[in-house]
Structures are given as structure tokens and as C-alpha cells.
Image (spheres, rainbow, N blue to C red):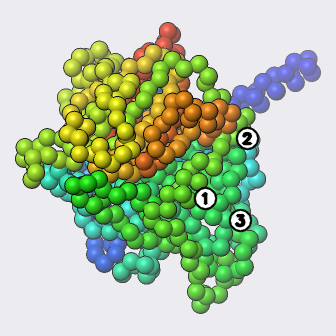
Amino acid sequence: MLRLLFLLTCALALLASSVASAAIVEHSFYVKNLTVRRLCSEQVVTAVNGSLPGPTLRVRVGDTLIVHVFNKSPYNLTIHWHGVFQLLSAWADGPSMVTQCPIPPGGKYTYKFELLQQEGTLWWHAHVSFLRATVYGALVIRPRSGHPYPFPKPHREVPILLGEWWNANVVDVENQAEASGAPPNISDAYTINGLPGDLYNCSQNRMYKLKVQKGKTYLLRIINAALNNQLFFKIANHNMTVVAVDAGYTVPYVTDVVVTGPGQTVDVLLAADQEVGSYFMAANAYASAGPAPPAFPAPPPFDNTTTRGIVVYDGAPTSATPIMPLMPAFNDTPTAHKFFTSITGLAGGPHWVPVPRQIDEHMFVTVGLGLSICPTCLNGTRFSASMNNFSFARPSSLSMLQAFFFNVSEIYTPDFPDNPPVKFDYTNIINAVNPSLLITPKSTSVKVLKYNATVEMVLQNTAILGVENHPMHLHGFNFHVLAQGFGNYDPVNDPKKFNLINPQSRNTINVPVGGWGVIRFTANNPGVWFFHCHLDVHLPFGLATAFVVENGPTSESSLPPPPVDLPQC
């Protein structure tokens, strides 16, 4: 009898532990106009729950997150949960006209999904036009209760969201660019947790402050929420230890500078081990664009300003002048490349997935800029962007995921090529004057994958209309970054550089300026998954495609029906 009671007690304890570690976390997002003062004027922006950035969502592995979105703004809207796998919940992924039609003004939609097989720092943002400039926030996935981090427990966890600010309506900024065919106007400031800092006019008192205690260690969850700029981030006189990127744990890597592309997250441990005082944290652009090709104008301007906040030690005198870090030059590609290539995955750590060795789909994809025909534009062409010379155009009558589920034709075409239509010297700027390479046709072309197929993709930058670093983001999956390099990819010698043991796992890769990157992933999640450049200056102009992953052999590996409240076009 005692043995039976003991076993029953153990079973109840296990059940209680399981229930406790798999909670339902529910939030409501009210998206509406908000008047805020930044720099020297007031601006009406679109924001969530009256805050900029929006609320930080905190969950644990295994939790179900439910977010009711009420669109009280004047714009169509969707929310993307950036980096969340959305295993069998593709309807909640959020990119407009890919997995759903947008939520109209006055409408609402409930996103519901489980947080499975990943933990760390992700984020959420609007996925319609430039609205993510102000509609964004952190999404923190902690380990299950009772499961430790694979590094010393920090004294405190702090989200650091790096953003951009325009002294203008950001929807108007994008619309003006599309109408003219030119790149959009650059931002007026960068921000740290929504505040520009004291280097900008009228912003002396609008600066983020992080208070720390000497001897304590802090986990900074750094998110690049900027629209169009990769960023350097430093804290004066302090090193940081990278322990995760894109919600994937890494071998600890000590650095004095963090480099992030739009969409990427980096978790670092900050030890408050310096003299008691005040130290600036700062962020500015990594502007990778190289020289323009002959007969073309110089590279477009970029926001060359610097945002900063302050790390203040307890007991620091209020009169002390903070120390400023020495920031890298804007075009410091060697520093950026060293950071991106020095990080390795924590093999055997929580949620680690070994590199798949059997490859079913080999793809070689060029990514870069170009032009498309535009009779109404000033020069008869507009700025464009493409992958394998296809410039992506979103459908307008039905989302691609609805077309996939209901087998509706003519919404997309399953003909995205595995190789570029023309082979050329990809990184030689002389090729930019070749009309056959410069003009990019519009299409809604996708790559169809069998369930559980393994994909290896070489992403090759081109020099058409200039060279620059492209942050490429894959929805629905993480991928292993096997190697990165400069120049044209060498299919004979570069595979010898592949890290097949402990490569970093990411959802966004910065393809090096004038270079290439190789990624590999397993398509084990049915649905339609957007793959695109996370520079919003390029996304509206077509630097994107999508993967259509077919259903698996069982109901547990097949996409379920759409929610009843899914918005209609």
C-alpha cells in the first residue's frame, strides 16, 4: 500500500511539473495611433498598447502563446513572430499575403501557437510596409521551469532593442519611394529601447539608462529592430560574452563589439567589472555598400548618426562624465566579418540539432539589386531587387498559404530556379552595365519542397547596382551557417571550409558584401515560408521568394485547417 501511494505521489508530481511548465500565456495588442515626441517635434506613429517599443512577451519552452490583435490603426496590419518555428501553426506566422491576408482597420485576429524546440531571444514586429519601424517588441523564451541556462545565471535580464526613427510618417516614406522608383529616405535617428540619446537635437533627456551593481553579471538580449541598417554595438571599457544568437545557444565568445543585421538577435553576458562610474553604450551603422559600378550614381546615403545610452554603476557620482566607446568605422567589413564568422553553435546544448549530412536539394541563389520596368517612374524604371533574377511580387487576392491549403492555382508558380538563369562573374561591378542582368522580371515564384527534404543553399551576392551585405531571413526554420566568404563561391574548394560539427544556427544570415554564405536546413514543417532580405529598403522591391513545404505522411505532419477568424482579402 505504501509503495502504491509512493508511486501515485510521484506520478502526480510529474504531472504537476508538466502542467506547470506548459502554461497558456495570453495578451491583447491594441494597435493604434500614438503621439510621441522624439528629436525636436511630435510625431503620430502606429504603436502597440501605447508604448514604443511595444510590450515584451515572456514565455517558457512548451508554453502556448495567445495574442489577440485589435487593429485600431488606419492601416492594414499583420504581426510576425520573428524566429518562431510555428510548428504546424503556419497560420500564425504573419507575413502579409504569404500566410494571411492583413487585418483591416477595425478588424481583429488571434494568433495562437506553441513555443517548441527553441529558447532564447526572439521578437515580434509588423509585417506590412514600414510599420515595423514602430510596431515591434521583444519575445523572450526561457527554459522550462527547473532547467538552467547553459551558462552562469545572470543577476538580471535586460532587452536592448535597437531601432530607427523618422521625422515623418513611415508609410508615406515607403509610398513615396515606390512612386518614384528610388530608394526611400533615410532615417533621422537610431534608438535604444525607443530613445535616441543625447547626440541628437532636443534629446538630452531621452536616453536609455541601465543601472548595474559592481560584481554582478547581466544578460543583455540585443535585438536589431532597425528597418534598413546593420549596426555596431559597444559599451565603453566593457567586453561582452556572446552566449546565443537568434535563440540558438553558442560556445561563449568574448568580444568588445556586437554586430547585428536587421532581424538578428544576440544574447550577451555583461560583467559589471569596471570601476564604479558611467559608461556609454552606443550603436551606429555598419554601411557595407561598396563603390558604385561605372555609369551609375554613388551608393545611396545612409543614416550616419550614433545613438547612445548609459550604463550607470550603483554609487557612481552624478557629476561624472560617461566614457564613450571607440566605434568602428562605418565600412569596417573586417570587424563585421570577424564577428559573424567567429561564433559557433553549442553542440550538445539545449535544443541542439546536428547538421544534416544527406542533401536532397542543392540550390545556388544570387541575391542583389537591379531595375524593373516602370512606365510611370521618372526614368522609366524603378529600383528593384531579386533572387536568381526573379523579383518577388506578393499576390493580392489570396494568401499563398490559403492557396496551398485549398489547392488554388494561379496565386503562385512552383518554378523558382535552383540556379541563376545566367552565369556570370557575380562580384565584378563591370557586369552591372549588362541589360540582360540588370532588368529583373516580377513574379510570384516559389520553391516546392517535399516534407523532410534537406536543403543546402549557396547565397551569392552580386555587384549589380553596387555591392553590400544582405541580411536574409527564413521563416519557419533555423538553418546551420556552414561557411561564409568573399568573392565568387568556389564549388570545389569552399566546401572544404564547411563547419559540419558545431556551426551557428540562425534564422537570419548576413551574406557578406561582395561574397557568399552557405546554409543548410531540413524542411520538416509543412506550409508556406517566406525567405527574404530583412532590409525593408529591399523587401518591397522584391528581394524574396518562398518555400512551399508539402504535407507529411500523417495528420501529425500535415498543416491543420485555418482558424475561423483568419482575415480575408
SS at mark 2 in the image = loop
Q: Residue most toward the top?
A: 553
Q: Which residue is mark 2?
A: 147
Q: Residues within 10 Å of mark 2 (few under 14, many from 20)?
A: few
Q: Compared with residue 40, is residue 560 higher up or lower down, i.e. above or below?
A: above
Q: Which residue is mark 3?
A: 271
**Can residue 156 be seen in the rendering of this structure?**
no
Query: In the rendering, at what x and y percent does residue 373 appear?
Result: 14, 40
In the rendered image, the quadrant that contains the C terminus is: top left
At horizontal 34% and vertical 43% (from top left) the residue drawn is 368
Q: Nearer the viewer, mark 1 or mark 2?
A: 1
At horizontal 65% and vertical 32% (from top left) the residue drawn is 500
Q: CA distance from mark 3 to mark 1?
A: 10 Å
SS at mark 1 in the image = strand
Contact? badges 1 and 2 (CB < 8 Å)? no
Contact? badges 2 and 3 (CB < 8 Å)? no
Q: Nearer the viewer, residue 263 or 517?
A: 517
Left or right of residue 147: residue 458: left
Q: CA distance from mark 2 to mark 3?
A: 23 Å
Q: Residue most toward the right?
A: 2
At horizontal 28% and vertical 72% (from top left) the residue drawn is 42
